[in-house]
Amino acid sequence: IASWFEEYGLNVNNSFKINANNTVEMSYNFYDDRRSQGIRIYDASGNAADHDTHFFRTRYKGHFKSLQWDLNAYFQNVQYFRIVESYKKSYSMYHVNSLRNDIGIMGNLKFSSVRNSFSAGFDLKNGSVNGADEYQTSEDIIKNIGELMHASAFMYNQFDITDKLSLDAAIHFDYVILNKSEFIVENPTDVSDLLVSYQSDISGNSWSTFSPKFSIQYK
């Protein structure tokens, strides 16, 4: 069959000025993307995929004299559905269902004077996926489940001793934890029995780094 493509989108933006120094911005985006690969065996839709994406963002920024701040937060939800048909030795069809969520908040602060510049910030985000290949021509279900959290923070300071000589100091910290990480095969038949040995659960693993920096610069 002929391949086809459909998409729909919506964007809404709004900005509100609290006063001369403080502003709040908000935006919402919706996107629906449907694609056919031009292959149909039995299912009326054939091999096709559908993405539904919702994205929301808000921002607050402001300043007071030499102090500036910027705070951002966002949330994204992606629902993915796909039909896969094939015919090799026999007919096979499965549905791919996946739900992805991403949420985060980040901010930074800046201050400057005649000889000193200081900045600090943080970034906190969490992403998750819950997906499965659900076979319609057998009982096999192959699941992928994951959730990752990442937190980071930094501080940076530059002090100008003279017009040509400066002291720079900075620290950066990162922490990552894998809250969920599972690969599961349910009701395996000859369709998925090769994947059974790859089942795993490494939830709870975490990593962290701390990076200090100090330098003297001559301009």
Image (cartoon, helix red, strand yellow):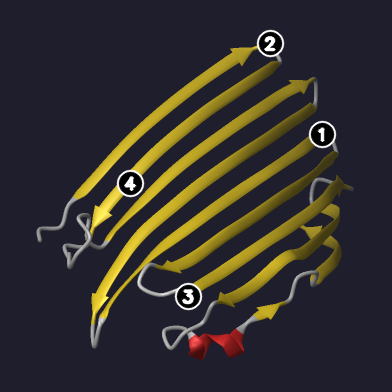
Residue 140's tag is 3
Residue 18's tag is 2
Q: Looking at the image, is mark 1 or mark 4 earlier in the sequence?
A: 4
CA gap, disc 4 and disc 3? 28 Å
Report which residue position mark 4 lands on. Answer: 33
Q: Looking at the image, is mark 1 or mark 3 earlier in the sequence?
A: 1
CA gap, disc 1 and disc 4? 44 Å
Describe residue 124's horizontal placement relative to residue 210 as left or right: left
CA gap, disc 2 and disc 3? 56 Å
Describe residue 78's horizontal placement relative to residue 119 as left or right: left
Name which residue lies at 68% across and 10% down: 20
- The residue type indicated by label 2 comes to Ile
Q: Do tag 2 and tag 1 residues touch (Cβ < 8 Å)?
A: no
Q: Looking at the image, is mark 4 or mark 2 earlier in the sequence?
A: 2
Name which residue lies at 42% across and 44% down: 52
68 or 90: nearer the viewer: 90
- The residue type indicated by label 3 comes to Asp
Crowding at label 3, few (<14), some or many (≥20) Cα neighbours within 10 Å? Answer: many
Under circle 1, the secondary element is strand
- The residue type indicated by label 1 comes to Phe
Image quarter hosting the C terminus: bottom right
Image quarter hosting the N terminus: bottom left
CA gap, disc 1 and disc 3? 58 Å
Q: Do tag 1 and tag 3 residues touch (Cβ < 8 Å)?
A: no
Residue 19's tag is none
Describe residue 33's horizontal placement relative to residue 15 as left or right: left
Under circle 2, the secondary element is loop
Q: Quadrant of residue 145?
A: bottom right
Q: Quadrant of residue 90?
A: bottom left
Residue 111's tag is 1
